[in-house]
Image (cartoon, rainbow, N blue to C red):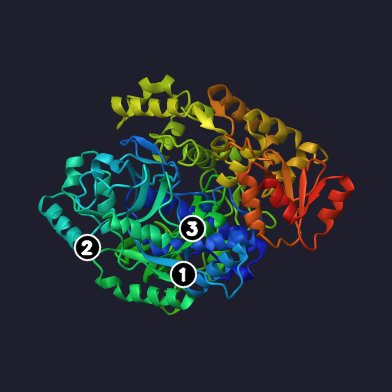
Amino acid sequence: MSAFREIPVTDMTELEAHAELKNLAKEIAEHDKRYYQNDAPTISDGDYDVLRARNTAIEEKFPHLKRKDSPTDKVGTPVQSGFSKITHAVPMLSLGNAFAEEDVQDFLDRIKRFLGLKDEESLEIVAEPKIDGLSISLRYEKGKFIQAATRGDGRVGEDVTRNVLTMKELPLELPAGVPDVVEIRGEVYMAKDEFMALNKKQEQAGAKVFANPRNAAAGSLRQLDSNITAERPLRVFAYAWGELSKPLSDTQMGVIDTFKSWGLPVNPYTRVCKSLADIMALYNQINEDRAALNYDIDGVVYKVNRLDWQDRLGFVSRSPRWAIAHKFAAEKAQTVVEKIDIQVGRTGKLTPVARLTPVTVGGVVVSNATLHNEDEIKRKDVRIGDTVVIQRAGDVIPQVVEVVKDKRPDNSEEFVFPHECPECGSHAVREEGEVDIRCTGGLICPAQAVERLKHFVSRNAFDMDGLGAKNIEKFWQEGLVKTPADIFKLSEHTDTIATWEGWKEKSIANLKKSIEDRRTIPLDRFIYALGIRQVGQATARTLAKNYLSFEGWYDAMTKAHDVDSPAYEDLNNIDGIGTSMAQDLIDFFDEPHNRKVMNDLKDQLTIEEFDVPDTTNSPVAGKIVVFTGTLVTMSRAEAKAKAESLGAKVSGSVSKKTDYVVAGESAGSKLKKAQELGIAVLTEEGWHELVG
């Protein structure tokens, strides 16, 4: 557990928030892999989303501290190599989370603020159980089922059409008169009684026994042999939609009723709630009925009923503003800390990990807990031999809630945090303002070098099949890969690789194909893959959107070294960047080794320019817009989202390059500067007239 995990977000200092965001990013990323890629989650969705909710809350309070590997920018995981890929016409995103009634009230308040609704105005919410299964997209054209895809990473999913065809309760044709294109989204699950029967059958046959119904459903749907899937009792609940050639209703509940009229299975608990009291009453009812249900759920989902309001609210990062999942509570257990190991990460951070006597928590065996840093160990006074309370609220590595002091051994000693790197022996220091101790070895430290390479090939970077953690370590140890560019020269070493255990002709062919497939990469993924401090997926996309091409970005970052230059001013003015992140970018480009890495990669790759949305008819496409003052007819977030959707660039400060300043009530220094520079100033009404 983080040293700061018990501190309310509202009370956190910037230093505490910085450290906690680092801890959360690591925990969540590891669990994403277990859940989405391996179909082997080690915690419930409810436990997992405790972490996501806290991460989001901290980022909302400290947006300038958002990390390059922020969980809020990630959805799912890339598709498995055994399936062809399907690009979703409309991304399949995830949901934000709530854990208490206060969180739900905050959700409702945020919606009203965004939409500019008064407190007494009605806000209808559709509530439905959150099924613990596997997300699916079902595409119908002219009423006939033609295609099914998993969520994958939210943009690209697995083609599981043949397997879905075996599901008995799924209609292959919709009634006459449906739109030409209907993409229905839902959750594939396995009923509890059918899961027990399947496991009994598996056990009798000496085959794999599944840990829970969710694993069984995911594993069955992802069978390469559809005959196996046909033998598995898969079911589905429809609850959402993607691409539609024409609207089905003007409300969320209206669409659900339409699905039901078409013969699609919808959850019987789904209903419209008109107040927080209604919402909580249904939540409590579903929670009470949970054990008796014949399917697993891990919470209740709330969605704004009016679809025009959903459109206005839009999306933020990986989730819609108009929906949230209210999760059930996590579970706890006691176990013993057998030893404390130190792991070295990509940035040199020394992370203490408690090795635990294995204990079952909520049906899952856990044996490790992250202790995050020296301060947490001191604050919790965690010692080897201690009995601790753990909570499954984050990945394969859960959190330590507290030490049971009355069970402490008499010979207990305080843990002394090392100040030498266990990997390379270099001095480990804690810089001023930091909570982490880092190895000073840099590139001479094998742990850091290997972790950077792992990041480069990770799912949200280059996403290279056949280059998992163990293989990267092997290639490093054998001297075949020392820099990212070396990865693209591995084809020259296939004769050597073929002599290693586990590498057959097919695996080598897959490796070569994966490498060749990644010789073309979008600019934002390339920037993210470089592992620049503070530059996560969202920031990488922001940089790509502003500089458009690798050459444009490289040239601008090089010139930004001069803090008095226009290039530095442009960088610092990008909404969401700021001085701290700008300095990390400059520091990265100041390092000759990093420039060599980028240039070597440029010689090997085709780095695609940023795909700018078609804003041909937009009067603000390519324009730099600054919003200032109190906006009355729209919230600041809504204004920014609308401007960016029209191809404008929203800046946080006014400069001579600014095209428009939209001034609300009580506009101050930004309005004054705009007037001094002769920049066009618009009222809110003028802005609405301009953009239509």
Q: Amino acid under label 2?
A: Lys
Please, what secondary structure does the residue beneath circle 1 have? loop
On the image, the x and y values in percent for residue 552 come to 68, 30
Q: Earlier in the sequence, mark 2 or mark 1?
A: 1
Q: Earlier in the sequence, mark 3 or mark 2?
A: 2
Q: Which residue was labeled with disc 1?
A: 99
Residue 242 vs 452, above or below: the answer is below
Q: Amino acid under label 3?
A: Leu
Residue in the foreground of this view, choosing between 396 and 462: 462
Please, what secondary structure does the residue beneath circle 2 have? helix
State the mark number for residue 307: 3
In this orientation, does residue 50 appear?
yes
Using the numbered discs, state the Cα–Cα distance from disc 3 to disc 1 in whole angstroms: 25 Å
Please, what secondary structure does the residue beneath circle 3 have? helix
Crowd class of label 1 (few under 14; some 14 to 19; many from 20; radius 10 Å): many
Residue drawn at x 72%, y 47% as measured from the top left: 651
- Contact, CB < 8 Å: mark 3 with mark 2? no
Using the numbered discs, state the Cα–Cα distance from disc 2 to disc 1 in whole angstroms: 25 Å
Q: Amino acid under label 1?
A: Phe
Using the numbered discs, state the Cα–Cα distance from disc 3 to disc 2 in whole angstroms: 34 Å
On the image, the x and y values in percent for residue 72 come to 52, 53
Q: Which residue was labeled with disc 2?
A: 192
